[in-house]
Amino acid sequence: MYKEDTIAAISTPHGTGGVGIIRISGDKAFEIAQKIFQGKKDFKLIRSHTINYGKIINPENGNILDEVLVSKMEKPKTFTREDVVEINCHGGLIVLKNILELCINQGARLAEPGEFTKRAFLNGRIDLSQAEAVIDLINSKTNESSKAAISQLEGKLSRKLKAARSKLIEFLAHIEVTVDYPEHDIEEITGQMIYKEIGEVKEKLYDIIKGFEKGRIIREGIDAVIIGRPNVGKSSLLNELSGKSRAIVTDIPGTTRDIIEEYININGIPMRIIDTAGIRETEDVVEKIGVEKTHRAIDEADLIIMMIDAKRGMDEEDNKILTMLGDKKLIILINKTDIVDENQINRIESLLKGKKYIKTSMKEGTGISELENAITELFVQGEVNINEEVLLTNIRHKNLIDRAVSSIERAMDAIENSMTLDLVSIDVTDAADYLGQITGESVSEDVMHEIFSRFCLGK
Amino acid sequence: MEFVAGEYDVAVVGAGHAGCEAALACARLGVRTVVFAINLDSIANMPCNPNIGGTAKGHLVREIDALGGEMGKNTDKTFIQSKILNSAKGPAVFSLRAQVDRRSYQIEMKNTLENQENLDIKQAEIIEILYEEVEGKKVVTGVKTHTGAVYKCKIAILTTGTYLKGKIIIGDVSYSGGPDGLFPANKLSDSLKELGIELLRFKTGTPARVNKRSVDFSKMEEQPGDERIIPFSFETEEINKEQVSCYLTYTNSETHRIIKENLHRSALFGGLIEGIGPRYCPSIEDKIVRFKDKESHQVFVEPMGLNTQEMYLQGMSTSLPEDVQIQMMRSVPGLENVSVMRSAYAIEYDCINPTQLSLSLELRNVEGLFTAGQINGTSGYEEAAAQGIIAGINASRKIRGQEPLILDRSHAYIGVLIDDIVTKGTNEPYRMMTSRAEYRLLLRQDNADLRLTPIGYKVGLVSEERYRKFEEKRRLIEEEINRVNKTNIAPTEKVNDFLKKYNSTPIKSGVKLADLLRRPELDYESLGEIDENRPELSFAVREQVSISVKYEGYIKRQMQQVEQFKKLEEKKLDKDINYDDIKGLRLEARQKLNKIKPESVGQASRISGVSPADISVLLVYLEQRRRQKA
């Protein structure tokens, strides 16, 4: 619904690569930028219509999301004639998505299809002759996104959401019937009675959010970490993979320069690859930080690519690493096969029984497509079709579920504080409403239906 | 023979709860008004339950009163039991309800109408709405009675209740008839059809009335009124009167057996009833069929008045034949020897599809024709009266060439009611419920005057004197809220002893009185003990202060929602827009928008079948039009 609130969206064309721009428009645009952008100058002091270098940082945990260029544009000389902030990121789709999500958490609303253009028109920025084009844009974008929404809503997620929502509707109906029919011999519901149950709904919603995390692979790509001793060929692998895919976005040097991230695209799956410093016990402080980072990267990774130097063979350190990995998804590369003989390779192979391994030579470029296929097989069957619309719908859904969860928390707080039912119902209604925005159902009609079908009322 | 019998600005057809408010509003606003009733002894009749108010309905009565209507005052004059419902469930849903003396209510209301300047009252059945065509549009010119008398008028307000082609059904017997043994209005429907108005057929019903002497109350639970009486009208200062009790008994397996064995003879299940009945007041047979597991149902026995032995059996509305009705009643404890005075019946009647109306309650396609009450597909005395006062106000404003008064969903339950029926229509008699109001914490019954009395004053229904009193009350509330927000409470021994007494955490440093008031375990009244400079204030003021401070957080949140809501409400849509011309609207949206002709983008957004994208398209279209005009 059209509201003059602050909106945000990714405003660069589809595709998984290249530089991306997130645009924020509305009264709160500067306030939001102030909270998440850290540059040389305080955002407030930045002059209008300038481009500024800095970092996007999540104010809640201090994590750096990307290095960016931020444009600050004061109204009215902007595309929408509202205050506008544009964040140029180079971190690829996943980073774009994360920053957009951050903007939404900080108070922006995900823009509707074509909404920037609509605002530009409504605020007199776009010529009257363009009105029809604006309408066409709104409609075509709406079609795209509803297609995406439908394709995502089918299946388990939708069923779980509907189940959670109908529980809420049930409680609401019970509250409402108690309120609207006070003298009927219906069991009067109290806050205490629904406290535990809305708590259960909340847990279910948490599960759904986690489900989002699990399905993340398809939507957001794979976090892969390359490990191996120095000089085993990690950088070459990285170059090989990214060079081939021609989808290098950037590299983000970490603070100690020993971890390098690259965003690549393998058979349609976005993948973030982290090249690590190597793992070994060390006394050197600087290196120690690097190694700790590597450990953390391994912990968080979806896939480990471990490289073994065919010439040196498996040594104790390699074995240590293998045990440390536990049941992580793992692909082992026996590299430098071009410079050793069959026997050496066989020796290594015999040590890797039961593990997935591929023989490669970075130098000669062999084994790379096998690796790509192995990765694809490991995570998805066949080609993955991922596009921006799917991604956006996803942010929207997750955001609505997050809000539903906070509404339930507020309702539970109210119950703990012995607030009356009419107040508790406000937040339960909000929660059901947020979920309804995903499933496309209206609360008031559903509650009314529930009341009359569940309870016996009348004169 | 046809003859011109008189000339008025406004003719009100029907003198039930909608008609009375409409006629009074018109006359009080200075337009010459006539009101017709088939029988003048049926003015303001309650053909169903003898009570006013209840959840959400009580809110409506207070809103009518705040605007300058009569229902609240008339109830205060004639009630015989008063109750506040939901007192433990929160301020948004506190509701007043009163049992009234049905006859006294009618007599008082009739007397009020009779004494009203600018108002004539006539006993006649109106059979035709007279009109002429002006530039292709039908315009009301008068009304005609069954005796051929023509009353010219600029505006007609139809408040026909359940009279239009009324059909009474008792089991396998059915006949043409109005409510409570009165005549039906059989001809007006045809005149409405000729005007091109789409009619619906609805059904409702009422239980039997029995003689009090035949009821054994010792087998029932007594339900007395509340000790403290809160009047409906903001103008009624204080009432002390003796109250009469209601009684509660229950149906049992025997009752249910009798009903089940005779289901085939019920009009509802025998197929005699074609009208659509309300889900929220099903007949007893309906309850038993739909809720098989429920072993017993409540029956409230309510007095119809002080000067009568008639008692109303709430919970036993039925369309079963008379012999079964008697058997069924006699199986209920306390009713073993019951003597029935009036049998239960179902009634079917014509009403209009309310989506043909503007929010002013004027039909969009007939200039000068307004409708209010059950004819609009609603149910209930209070719902009717609420529409009546709005139709009356808007009729008189139209006569004076003023813009109509439209209350929106954030102003009042009245606004929710009218917006719902006009925007969404209804497929059963529409009953007001608190859950229909999205901003119900703001639309409380206690603050109806704060919300609406300034509007009533501007419109002209609230007197100068009343308004001055109201302003004084508002000033006192504001001052006291300020004081409570500013007052510091020091952590003295007395204060902490007080807090301990209420199981409230003691304070270590000074806090604001308002902060203590927000603690769930404390309230404004109890805090009096430690609030030394508290001024003496009336209950109404204390109540406002208490609620406003205590629920400030929630109230603010709802007010922010209202702010958002208003943005789209304020974007008006002309009635002459042809939605087929707007490229980019989906087909379903075009059809719906052309059918409902919403008055604002906000209203359009509530029509089912109009999507957010359609709303965006509408906004772009509006801007396009604005610039083309400029």
Image (spheres, rainbow, N blue to C red):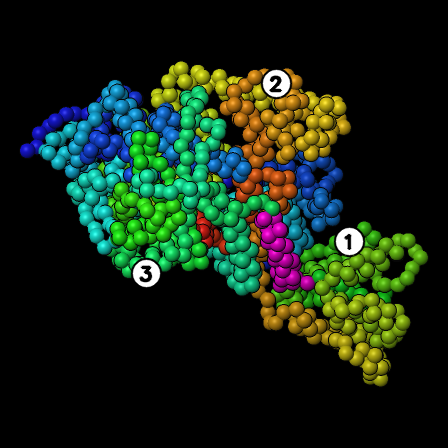
Number of the label disc, if any, that sits on residue B534 = 2
Q: Which quarter of the image is occupied by the C terminus of chain A? A: top left
Q: CA distance from mark 3 to mark 2?
A: 66 Å
Q: Secondary structure at mark 3?
A: helix
The reply to whether dot 3 and dot 1 touch (C-beta < 8 Å) is: no
Residue that badge 1 annotates: A253
Q: Is residue B417 visible?
A: yes
Point out residue B372 in the picture as x, y percentages from the top left corner.
Answer: 30, 36
Region rendered in magenta = A193-222
- Kind of residue at badge 1: Pro
- Mark 1 is surrounded, within 10 Å at the Cα level, by few (under 14), some (14 to 19) or many (20 or more) other residues, namely few
Asked whether A207 falls inside the magenta stretch, the response is yes
Residue that badge 3 annotates: B261
Q: Nearer the viewer, mark 3 or mark 2?
A: 3
Subunit of mark 2? B
Point out residue B63 in the picture as x, y percentages from the top left corner.
Answer: 41, 30
Quadrant of residue B44 within the rendered picture: top left
Q: Is residue A243 above or below residue B505?
A: below
Asked whether B123 falls inside the magenta stretch, the response is no
Q: Is A128 on the left or on the right of A368, as rendered?
A: left
Quadrant of residue B98 within the rendered picture: top left
Point out residue B108 in the picture as x, y percentages from the top left corner.
Answer: 30, 25
Point out residue B415 in the picture as x, y percentages from the top left corner.
Answer: 40, 35
Q: Is residue A179 above or below residue A439?
A: above
The reply to whether dot 1 and dot 2 touch (C-beta < 8 Å) is: no
Q: Is B309 on the left or on the right of B562, as rendered?
A: left
Looking at this view, name the residue that lies furthest to the right: A283
Pointers 3 and 1 within a single chain = no
Q: Secondary structure at mark 1?
A: strand
